[in-house]
Image: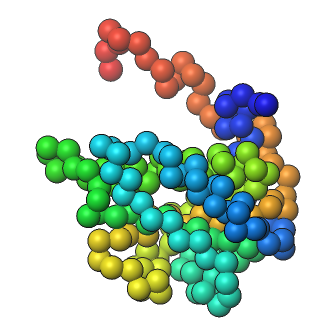
Amino acid sequence: MESFLELACRRFSCRKFKNQAISKELIEKVIEAARVAPSAVNNQPWIFIAITEEPLKKMIAATYSRNWIESAPVIIIACGDHNRSWRRSDGKDHCDIDIAIAIDHITLAATDNNLATCWVCKFDAMKCSLLLELPAHLTPIALIPLGFPDEPPKVDRHKDKRKPLNEILFWEGIKF
């Protein structure tokens, strides 16, 4: 069994997927990781919609400007339920934060099951919402293409493109 850090380092943003179906059971296994994710006050303000069938998958893919997404056999739409999300006393809605944590669980669970994902936020959320006929309190937050990777993982990507620990970790008493 690999360590958590090894798993996190193995995850990458995949943009080319094999033309290979994913079983319903495997999709459910990946989403189970999101189900157990922490959320503010345990409100769990999320809904995940797995799109596997054509032509809806093509229509959802068209809400994003790049066509590589069409190679994914599954597109998971992570939606935030603003009727369920917790709000801090100053009004800050934690829905997007909670969804981000759940999506991270999805990406890592996918990696753990030899699948790949890419976190896509630059899509037409309004068009996506209309295609799915979502009620006003549900907002599409991200598209998560899911599939078996058809490109090699970028193993050493963390070495050169990540800030060193001493640039992100500070101890008490530091003045900015």
Residue 76 image position (x, y, % from top left): 58, 68
Residue 109 image position (x, y, % from top left): 66, 48
Q: Which residue is at 76% across, 50% downward?
A: 113
**Which quarter of the picture shows residue 89?**
top left
Q: Quadrant of the C terminus?
A: top left
Extreme top residue here?
173
Which colour assignment does the render follow? rainbow
Q: Is residue 137 left or right of residue 164?
A: left
Q: Is residue 110 left or right of residue 33?
A: right
Q: Which residue is at 35% across, 71% downward?
A: 138
Q: Quadrant of the N terminus?
A: top right
- Camera-side residue of 5 and 113: 113
Q: Which residue is at 75% across, 64% downward?
A: 147
Residue 15 appears anywhere in the view:
no
Extreme left residue here?
89
Residue 94 image position (x, y, % from top left): 31, 50
Q: Which residue is at 60% across, 25% downward?
A: 164
- Camera-side residue of 135 and 66: 135
**Which quarter of the picture shows residue 11?**
top right
Q: Residue 76, relative to residue 67: is it above or below?
A: above
Q: Is residue 43 left or right of residue 9?
A: left
Extreme front residue here?
25
